[in-house]
Amino acid sequence: MIRRHYLPSWFVLRLLIVLIIFPIMTVKPSLQTMIGPLTIVGTQPHIVGPADALVDRMIINGDLRVISMVTDPLVSGRSHERLAQFKDGLRIFGSEITRQREHGQITSIFGTIHSEINIDIVPKLTTQDAIGATSVSDSPTIATELLILHDQNIRGYRLVYRIQQFSAAGLIVSLVDAHTGGVIRVQNDLKTQAMSLPCNDCAVGTGRGVKGDQKKISVQTLGGNFRAYDALRPPAIITYDMRGDWLGTLNVLTGAASLTEADVATDSDNDWHDGASVDAHVGAGWFYDYLAHRFERNGLDGSDGPIVSLVHPVHRNDLFKVPNGIRNLFHLNAFFCATCGPNGLMVYGEGLPTGFVLQNTGQSVDFFSAGLDIVAHELGHAVTEFTSGLVYEGESGALNEAFSDLLGVGTEFFMAETGRHKPEQADYLIGEDVLKPGGIRSIADPQSQGDPDHYSKRFLGNIDNGGVHTNSLIASHAFYLAVEGGINRTSGIQVNGVGSSNRPQVEQAFYRAFAFLLPANATFTMARAATTQSARDLTGSVSGLAETIAEAWSAVGVE
Amino acid sequence: MIISRSVRWKAASLLAFACFARVPQADAQIHRDAQFVVSANTGIQTTVNTRVDRVNFELFAETGNFSATQNLGRTDVYDIGIAGRVWKRFRVGAVAAYTNQASTAAIDAEVPHPFFFEFPRTASGVSTELGHREWAFHLQGQYWLPLGEKSILTLFVGPSVFKANQELVTSILTTERGFPFDIVALATDTTEVVSITAVGFNLGFDLSYFGLKQLGFLGKSERLDHLGVAVTARYSRAAPGIELKGQFQPALELGGTQVVGGIRVVF
């Protein structure tokens, strides 16, 4: 179906002209004839056909460029193409189209296309001027990009610099008007929780996690010591122990310093006792295993790129000796920094000293790597980063968070139900092993943690990038209902779930949708259409999986 | 070494003939009055033993295990013996028996996973040509009784001393096929020959026939009165415990039921 955003009703007629009449005409329409932002949710042939023709014309004109093309590992003969929209060589922020092909034929299209972009694309400000205009101008700048932003506040377009800077407050992304120098938006882009063996120097040791559970740890021998470098799995999985050096950690994150061999977590007898290191290192491997087994995905980037984790970024007992920003960043957070290092860095917070609790919830906070769901959630952000790149604000940001929660929950169940780690207690709580009691979120019962379980109750404010964490429960609760079934407390709609034994099917349907079908600026409505389409792709129309997922979305108020 | 039955019988006949040549002429009842009986037999051991050895090993910070199952089947037996009269129909004797066979062991292993506890992979294979050699020295108290004019039945029982060399699988080497390490293959195994000496027992009976001269096919020489043919059924057993890599294994079954035939020379 085609939906319009922020368009007066008379635009409908013109949209029809663009999508239906123009493809029939022999004269190709130019972009100048197009109008406003156009959202495409195409899963039916009568939508897919004209939309595909439009996309093809825009590719020929150079207005859409292919930025990725992947073969679907779960459905034979399918591939996914991701295109970004450009105007005069400048990317339009968040404007993407995804096309799914089956043996060359387009089967679904999702995304948004912008038109009538009448702005001056020559910036009046230099890059340095724009950096100087940011609130953290003294912090190291990681990346800058000149692009076009669709600003919903002015219902129009701006030429902006997107500037990424790492500071004690996190990964700050600022959008600065390239003509006026005005800071349009500032957001924190940290995705947080608020054999013979095939290698001669491989070794398998044992370790106890933060919770005291024993697990195997894949390491490497070096000079009589053992280092947290997993060389048994295809990607290099490395865990660094920052030994409480928060300034050094900050320098690594900002690119002012590099990680060294001396920073790698080590153990002298291969019987590891630092629970935070053990859980971070082992958890990264387990998440890799989950991706490989469930989705046939090769790691975070799909190409077995390295997975690098940092533990002990600060001393736990230095809680009141460090700046507030550091406390929030390194004590009370875990995050994946996509722009740090060549493949991103995972940082696990230290938690609170014994006896301390969070003022607002009364919860104690353990080492963040103690929660397998948190490990998988944060690394899941990397998967999003390397696939759909769901923009971390508003509804797309909520979907980004929901996807990570689903991966977190999925990893827990995978480990427990397959017998890979019998002590694992799989559940639908997020972070319950770290923030005790209760964890951070409950995707089974969002309201129990004060989060919305229905679209009508979504948070509409600006904080937390538009409520990306709290609103994520709308989508993740739909996932829960599709699996386990139940009655949504707000709508009263009952869903007959597919059952926990069929959870992998739902996981795969959501994974394909969130990773491949959704564009970066996806909405809940798109997510509904994409997940049901994905279910049909996976199981056909007779299994009932797509219908169950659609019912679940209806139960949470997303149509 | 494999010797055909016919060759064995010919060899026994030649041996008997050699003995016969040195024996002085005797009367027709010489087998009942003989002071000594020399025997040489060959035959089969009918007992089939299935042996399962289980060995634990450490791999990837966890204990794995494998079992090696081998069937020690029917095999050839060779023995020689001598018995001497001690009183009336009582004799004492000694028999030395030898068996040798090779068997195949089926190996089934549970190999620890490099990433997870209690998540073993299975691997299987075979180990061939596992040798089993057994020497048995049977001491016997014998009692004989006549069965008609030409035959005697001898009953015997006594202690046995066994010496055995048993080749057992002591360790395995697996080959990993890489991530996700769900499949492991058995690359090779190593074996060890366990030598053991044990005391057991033997009992059985021997049915001898000394009417070869009357049959005529070997001629009519008086010397044939010293020569007989016999069938012996013997059961012997010892079951010593053994260890592999410091781990106790099921007892090694030695001996068994043997049915042999051969010649008897009396003098």
Image (cartoon, coloured by chain):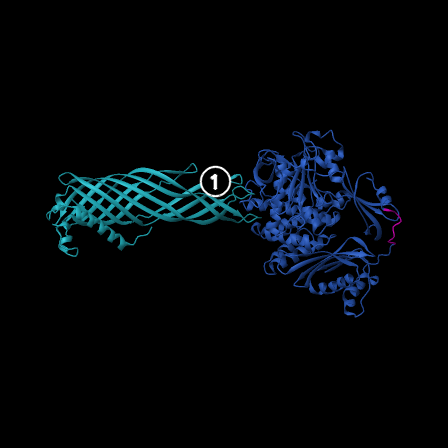
Chain colours: A blue, B cyan
Task: State whether residue B125 appears in this view.
Answer: yes
Task: Count the marks.
Answer: 1
In the rendered image, which quarter is residue A32 located in?
bottom right
User: In which quadrant of the rendered image does the C terminus of chain B lie?
Assistant: top left
* A296 sits left or right of A96 in the view: left
- Amino acid, disc 1: Phe
Residue under the image location 37 percent in, 48 percent down = B102
Chain designation of label 1: B
Residue found at the far bottom of this picture: A26
Q: Is residue A242 above or below residue A17?
A: above
* B43 sits left or right of A312 in the view: left
The span shown in magenta is: A120-126
Residue A122 drawn in magenta = yes
Task: State whether residue A438 appears in this view.
Answer: no
Category of crowding for the residue at label 1, using alpha-carbon neighbours closer than 10 angstroms: few (below 14), some (14–19), many (at least 20): some
Of residues B32 and A411, which is closer to you in this image? Answer: B32
Q: Quick one: SS at disc 1? A: strand
Residue A306 drawn in magenta = no
**Residue A339 placed where, x, y %?**
74, 45
Of residues A530 and A459, which is closer to you in this image? Answer: A530
Q: Which residue is tagged 1?
A: B57
**Residue A18 placed where, x, y %?**
79, 64
**Residue A403 placed where, x, y %?**
67, 48
**Residue A269 placed where, x, y %?**
57, 33
Dominant secondary structure (helix, strand or loop) of the stretch shown in magenta: loop
* B96 sits left or right of A188 in the view: left
Of residues A546 and B229, which is closer to you in this image? Answer: B229
